[in-house]
Every structure is written in C-alpha cells, then in structure tokens.
Image (tube, helix red, strand yellow):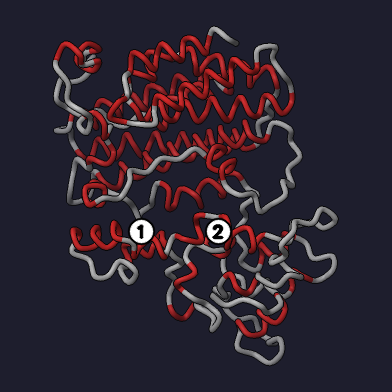
Amino acid sequence: MKIGFTCALGFVVANGLGLAADAPEPSKYTGPGSCSSPACHGSVQAREDTSVLQNEYSTWVVRDKHAHAFINLTNPIGTRMAKIMGLPKPDTAPRCLSCHALDVPLDMRARTFDLTDGVGCENCHGPASAWLGPHTTRDWKYEKSLDLGMYNTRDLIKRSEKCLSCHLGNAEKFVDHELIAAGHPDLYFELDSFMSVMPPHWKDVDKDPWLGVRSLGVGQAVQLREQLKRIARESQGGIWPEYAELDCFACHHSLTAAKESWRQERGYAGRRPGNPPWNLSRYVVFRRVIQEADPQASQQLRAQVDSVNALVTALGSDRKQIAAEAASAAQMANGLAERLATMHFDQPTTLRLLKGISSDADDIAGQGERSAEQATMALDSLFIAYTKNDHLANDAQIRAAIHGLFQQIEDPSAYNGFKFAQAMRSLNALF
C-alpha cells in the first residue's frame, strides 16, 4: 500500500508527467494511497471546519472491512473455495477479484495503483487521475469532478447501484448457487442499514432530516429491480433454475420431527410442496413503501411480482416467459426508484411504514429467514430515522422489541416463522 504523498503530487505521478498535460488523457485508477496525505484525506482526526472530514483514508484503512477484502481471499476458507471451484489462487482469479479488489484493465492502472489494496476509494468514487489534483483547488465544484469521471455517490439510485454491483451482482459478477455451495455466504442488502454500520467517512450534504427513510425506499426499489434483471438474464442462460434466486433456507435448515416443523404446519400455499420458493425478501418491505407512495402503482407491481413468483417457483416454467415478466417488473421498479429518490418523507409517513411492515408479520415470517431479516433491518432503520426527529413515549420498549427480532434471525437453522411472527405482532402493538 503506497502512502505519504499529497493529492496534487498523486495527480502528477498518476499521469506519469512532470507537469499537467495539455490534452486530456483517459482517467486512470491511482489507488487509495493517492488520497492518504494528512492534508487531504489522511488526517487522524475528523475536521468540522472543512467541507469534508479529511480523515476518510484513515477511517477506511483502519476501520472499514472493505480494506480487507483482498486479503480475505487468501484465508483458509477462500483458498478452499477456490480449490472446490477449480479456480487458480483466489487472489489471482478474476471471478474473485471482481468484487474483492479493483480489477480494472492494465491500461487503466496508474503507476501508483496496487491491486492488493482491496476495495478502496475508487471502487466507489471512480478513476481519480483526471480530478485528483484539480478537486483540491479553491472553489472547485463537485459537479466538475463528476464531469471528469467521479462517480456520483450522492445520487441515491447510483449509490444503490454501486453497492449492489457486488452485494447482489450484475451481468459481469455475481454469487451463484455453485459459489455458495463452495462456501461463499449468500448475499443480502439494505442500503440504509448497510450505510449505518459502515464507519462514516462522509458528511451528508443532503440535509433532509428524513434522508434515512428515503435511502431505505430507494435502496429497496433498486435491489428489487436488479434482482428482477438478474432473473431475466439467468432464465435465458445455460443453467436454470439458478437456485441462488430461491429461498435458501427452504432446503438448508435443520431437520426436525414432523410434529415440530413450523414449515409443514404452515403448509405450502400457492406452490407444490418440495418446490423451493423464489426469495421474496427484496419485495416484502418494498411493497409497503410503494403502497405508501402510490397505492395504484403498488397494485400493479404486486401483480407483476406475483406473476414472476409463480413462474420461478414452478421450476418448469417457460424461460422466455420468465424473462419477459421479470424484465417488465424490473422496468416498473426502476420508475418507482426514480420517484422515491425525489419523494418527501416525514414523521407520519415513517410511523405508518413502521406500523405497516410490522403488521405483515404472518406473511413476512412465513416467507422465511431472509424476508424476516430484511424486515428486521428495515424496521430498525425506520425507527432510528424516526427517533432522530421525534420520540414515542415507549421508545425503550420498541428498541427492545426490535432487538428481539434480531436475536431470532441470528441462527438461520433455529429460525421459527411462528415465533418471529408473534414477535412482530408484539412490536406492532407498541406503535
């Protein structure tokens, strides 16, 4: 890892020049070391008198798990996974590097670039060589950096897309059932929850007091859209069904005596027993958000999702029909994401969302552990956003009830839909 030179010097070194070039060159990736000067983003202490904290690099290198993404490839589990997959060393396999590092073409790497830095600044913010030096100048505007190749993480849709490119996958990189079987964890995502547990290295430019609720809504819309787009791609590929799209724990759960099985007691409404259902976790919360924003659109989206759900769960459905239905639903989810990105949320709306999601206890719990997990994260995010702006008389009870939901999803094999539903109903009674 290379550190210790100023941003301006990094700009010069990254371009291999002794002074600024007259003609613009394609922007290159310079590596996080180019941001590490104490005068730029490498300060030990955060500063409040500047537009940025200036300790962003220090926060990343010491506290952010993304900084360890590359080295994690070489631990015993990563090595074993590569062996099972028939891959070369995991720290050289493109399949692994696509998310655990910044694996860009050689001609896009500046001399300061180091693949072993893992998931660094430019994974999210884009190639820096074109704007690295100029963005430190007086009166420089953020929009100028965007024109020079910086990625717009302030845009909630783009931010969600960037996170989901690894935390769900896209056409170039993804975690499928083969990789999960080799040992990779199943992927899940909730934008506001994930942002809240990251060590913060930013100042919120958006001063909307209900930004967390809007982030949750946009993140839910984009992850549903991306899941639907993935189904549309996969259903036209070589292997279908792709079991990573289904509810993992419908099959991967501890076996019990029939009299003790909550799944068998619940039954298999709407599907053939033995057919693992589509993983609906990326819809169970979003349907409430859209119902709040646009009841008519909510009904239309539900009909489309129900259609995809029936086709995917049936396993033997026509692939072309699956792709068409999923693509259509993805297009609608995209429009809803754009709408939510500009929507105004407030105290009554947030409280209605808390009540609405928790009132879906039986349906969410019955969908399985992943849906319960998504609802728990969403309820936690919404309640945090609410308490930043207002308080309920029984805040402590609500917090304890949400904590109880988290306890119930800690061990997927011990998950019980009936118990989780009862806990959600108890939470709902507190609002």
Question: Which quarter of the figure has residue 319?
Answer: top left
Side of 401 relative to 78 (left or right): right
Closer to the camera, 256 or 198?
A: 256
Give the mark, 2 or 1, whose residue is nearer the N terminus: 2
Please, is residue 378 above or below residue 66 in the view? above
Q: Position of residue 243 (x, y in %)?
A: 22, 40
Q: Quadrant of residue 49?
A: bottom right
In the picture, the disc for residue 124 is 2
Amino acid under disc 1 = Glu
For label 1, the residue is: 172
Residue at x-position 47% and y-position 35%: 333
- Image spot of residue 400 (x, y percent): 55, 20
Alpha-carbon neighbours of circle 2 within 10 Å: few (<14), some, or many (≥20)?
Answer: some
Tell me the amino acid under the disc marked 2: Cys
Quarter the C terminus occupies? top right
Q: Nearer the viewer, mark 2 or mark 1?
A: 2
Out of 237 and 88, give the one closest to the viewer: 88
Q: Which residue is located at x 52 percent, y 38 percent?
A: 219
Alpha-carbon neighbours of circle 1 within 10 Å: few (<14), some, or many (≥20)? few
Residue for point 39% across, 31% down: 410
Residue 16's label in the rendered image is none
Asked whether, in this view, residue 392 is left or right of residue 162, the answer is: right
| Left/right of residue 137 with respect to residue 231 in the rendered view | right
Q: Secondary structure at mark 1?
A: loop
Q: Secondary structure at mark 2?
A: helix
Tell me if residue 71 comes above or below residue 53 in the rendering. Answer: below
Q: Spot the residue most to the bottom.
A: 18
Question: Picture coordinates of residue 365 (x, y %)?
Answer: 37, 19
Residue 65 picture location, percent across and down? 50, 54
| Gap in angstroms between the C-alphas marked 2 and 1 | 17 Å
